[in-house]
Amino acid sequence: MKRFNIAALAGDGIGPEVMREALGVLRVAEGKFDFKLEVTEGAVGWAGIDADGKALPDDTLALCKKSDAILFGSVGLPERDPTVPKEERPERAALLRIRKEFGLFANLRPVKLPAALAHACPLAKERQGGGIDILVVRELTGGMYFGQPKKTEDLGSGNVRAIDTMVYTSLEIERIARVAFHAAKLRRRKVTSIDKANVLENGVLWRETVSRVGRSHPDVALEHQFVDNAAMQLVLRPGQYDVMLCENMFGDILSDEAAALGGSLGMLPSASLGAGRGENVFGFYEPAGGSAPDIAGKNLANPIAQILSAALMLRYSFGLNAAAAAIEDAVQRAIEAGLRTGDIFNPAETGARKVGTSEMGAAICAEMVR
Ligand code: NAD
């Protein structure tokens, strides 16, 4: 039997509520499939500061280091964040620190709009093409956000110049491209690579390098698009995309645009992957949304983003594709059965029933064993 150690860091706000449901679903998956998870919980965010004086306590970091993957809730509380210096605030001190510590260079954001939630999507139904199912793969550690020189300088006479530099090496592009092709093989086998090769040197290198990696994956269709066209195509014909491969800044923008098509932040999981460790890939899995303090502690949060993050962990870190698909199917069936947390509820929808966090989690567990 395969065994894995995971660090479960629920964090703040709705984190503990949605984490509870995700761990419940993982227990059901263990019972159905041949694997065992050793789950150890750790404090992070304000929960870490309150328990141990730091947003990422040393014990929590040590726990992460000896784990095979991190399942993360969310951190930060807007009314408390400004009470400590910026570098000690949860998002910076915990999230950014973990990204750096574990070399997480690939960010995967799947956006899936089930046909039953067509009403929650800003696009007209005929544009949705029977449901949207896109995976945005974003490079996370290079490009314009980190390239040097990066500075602001006074040119005198009231004129100021700001410089950011876009830098990529072919090795950085190759490793993110391999993640995209690998992910496409678990989906519909198509990669659309996004660049600005008509204007940027980086774009030319990006296109050449991705094409070269693509030649090693002849079973995956590869298409190239300029980023400005992609921004438009995403809202005109989202059904054309399977995997969208983007450099850091283009991915930042396009993954949010794609996320808007998914209906609610409460439905959107994400994965950040580091380098492989033998057969396994170390990964950090979290919902796309934050700690949602407006609804925390009220059994109102949608646990689906956290549950789907757990499914991504099974697929991308542990290679448990059948178990991951079973969780995703169970979520789909709960939605088709009409269950809706407040964020995806529309009173005009016939057959829809408003439920709380725990009821949604229990319904997904029940669908797993049906
Ligand atoms: P947010 O994502 O927490 O909330 C935005 C809106 O989305 C709110 O109305 C919220 O109720 C709703 N929402 C989010 N997740 C939901 C869910 N699962 N179910 C139903 N509704 C959901 O963003 P915010 O309000 O800007 O930030 C709140 C705190 O979270 C801040 O301290 C911020 O810094 C932090 N934050 C953390 C992360 C992270 O941990 N990765 C990400 C974003 C924001």
Image: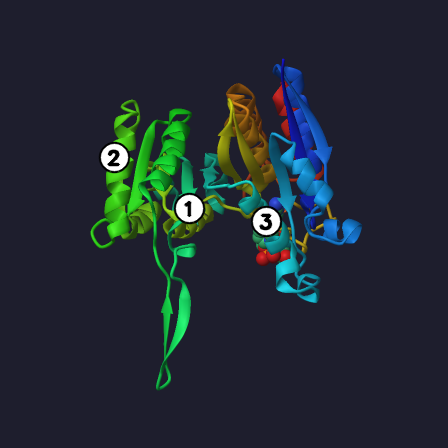
Secondary element at tag 2: helix
Q: Name the residue under label 2.
A: 211
Instruction: State whether residue 268 is above or below residue 219.
Output: below
- Residue 215 rendering spot, x and y as whole percentages: 25, 27
Position of the C terminus, as image quadrant, is: top right
Question: Closest to the observer: 356 or 4?
Answer: 4
Mark 2 touches mark 3? (CB < 8 Å): no
- The colour scheme used here is rainbow
| Mark closest to the chain's N terminus, 2 or 3 | 3
- Give left or right: position of 338 versus 55: left
Q: Is mark 2 within 8 Å of ligand 1?
A: no
- Residue 15 rendering spot, x and y as whole percentages: 68, 45
Mark 3 touches mark 1? (CB < 8 Å): no
Label 3 sits on what residue type? Arg
Question: Closest to the observer: 138 or 142?
Answer: 142
Label 2 sits on what residue type? Ser
- Residue 47 rendering spot, x and y as whole percentages: 74, 49
Query: Which of the labelled discs sits on residue 218, or is there none?
Result: none
- Residue 91 rendering spot, x and y as whole percentages: 61, 54
Q: Is mark 3 within 8 Å of ligand 1?
A: no
Label 1 sits on what residue type? Ala
Q: Mark 3 points at which residue?
A: 97
Can I make out residue 269 in this image?
A: yes
Q: In which quarter of the image is residue 132?
A: top left
Instruction: State whether residue 340 is above or below residue 91.
Output: above
Q: How far apart are marks 3 and 1 (CA)?
A: 26 Å
Query: Which of the labelled discs sits on residue 258, or is there none?
Result: 1
